[in-house]
Amino acid sequence: MEQLYLNRTFTSTVTAEAIDPEIVAGFRRVCESHLEAVFSYIRYRVATGDAAEELTGTTFLKGLERLRSFDPQRGEMTHWLFAIARHLVTDHLRAQRRWTLVPIDWLTEPASRDMSPEQSVSESELHQQLLHALRRVRNRDRDVIGMRFGAGLTNREIATITGFSERHVAVLLQRALARLRANLESQGVTNASGH
Amino acid sequence: MHQVTEEELLSLGAEWRLSTPPALRIRVADIADRAPVAGQDTVTPRTKSQAWIPGHAMALAAAGVAVLLLAIPFSRDAIAHQAYRVLQSLGIAPSTQLVTYQAQGADEVNASLRHGQQEVGAGRAWRVRTFYGGFGGNVPPNASPDVRRIDRADTLRAAVTIPLLAPDGPYRGQPLSFHHALLAPDGVVFAFFGSGDTEVMLFQAPVVPGKPISFSRAVVGRDGIIIGVLPAIETLDIGGQRVTWDPDTTGLNRALSALRWEDAGVNYSLYGRALTKDDAVMLFSSLRPLN
């Protein structure tokens, strides 16, 4: 039986046929516990907060729509959800073609209004440079960096999501960081490199 | 120093996790509620869908934490110093113009940003970031380059010579009261009213003959190219005052929309979170002297 659910912000069709209550409970837990991680990961991948917000919401909505296909024997729900997020981000980036519209504000980072403008400028300088450098690295680099530092996933979890070996993930991450540091160095952030 | 980048990346990730929009939290809570459970004919929304919104998120929403930079910094004299090439300049009032720049390469953009940072660093220019864009100007000779934060309306009134206005809400059901202001060295005032999703900012700048204030929007391509975005203005007459509705044309941030006008030697721009034209007209109609 198909049931159409409507609300103010989106329209979606989900199958109202009952799903294993444990899976539903797991989905609800993940919605609560991993929203910030998914948002942060996507925020690392895309250029604007608005796009990240939309893609994050869509990730969970797709998760709901595909909940019936989730097989707990094949892995954890969080990994399954991150896989959905990665696909959505990939589709989003493809759709941007050459002219990805990124507001100029992406060259800077969010700062607290409670700080004085002078404070904001000084405390955010490295973040600004970091954002600028991130914008220049490849999507694949941002993918692993986003999973590791945005979502806080372990290399093992990233390996599960990507299908790579844990060792390969470590190498990818190392190379991505090296390229990021090189970009930072090119901006004159010398303390970002070296061992 | 290997850890520096990783620490910064973790810090950035933590910052973004904290900045998860409350509206998104509510949306995802709603999605969670829609998961069909055995034995339920219909899926009813959780009545306390915000219950698990962390306290810090609500605090952030109340504080309106996200501050973005757009527009073109150093919008008065400094345009001449920048590498930007003007594609279109649209005068909407005697001393107000909407400027659109031609596409600029990443190197030119970086050079302009560096120049701006140098000017600020040398105390020759000021810069303010707000949720509604970045603003900047020149520091008058012998003036302090500091941008002052002022938390009291009477202190603000005493510090400036221009007639200050304030919206006299309510706005979206919430009362609007003076929250704080930023006062730039050249007398430009950024006055904030209300908070969170119902925050309103009124940009108020003394008109300087021969030095029009310019507003601009641009987006940056993946490869660092800046692309100017043309405005799509609408001129309105509200109670005999000619005003210009200048909506966001980037499609990326409705907070960049503004209602602009000049009156009595002051340049005004009214901004608000997700401001609509109807909101702007209503707020304009409610303006009173700041008490």
Image (tube, coloured by chain):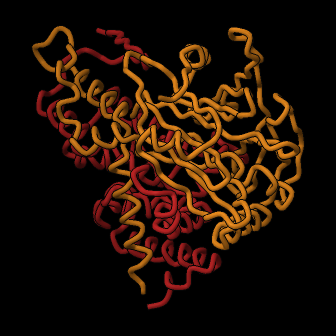
Q: Quadrant of the N terminus of chain B?
A: bottom left
User: Is residue A141 visible in the rendered structure shown here?
Assistant: no
Question: What colour denotes chain B?
Answer: orange
Left/right placement of residue A44 relative to residue A103 reads left
Above or below, B156 against B118 in this view is: above
Left/right placement of residue A76 relative to residue A82 reads left
Q: Residue at x 78, y 50 (%)?
A: B76
Left/right placement of residue B153 relative to residue B103 reads left
Could you say where residue B178 lies in the image, as x and y percent from the top left?
A: 43, 33
Above or below, A183 against A7 in this view is: below
Q: Residue at x 63, y 37 (%)?
A: B204
Q: Residue at x 14, y 32 (%)?
A: A25
Nearest to the observer: residue A171 or residue A49: A49
User: Is residue B271 visible in the rendered structure shown here?
Assistant: yes
Could you say where residue A184 lies in the image, as x and y percent from the top left?
A: 57, 75
The chain assigned the colour red in the figure is: A
Could you say where residue A67 lies in the image, as x and y percent from the top left?
A: 28, 30
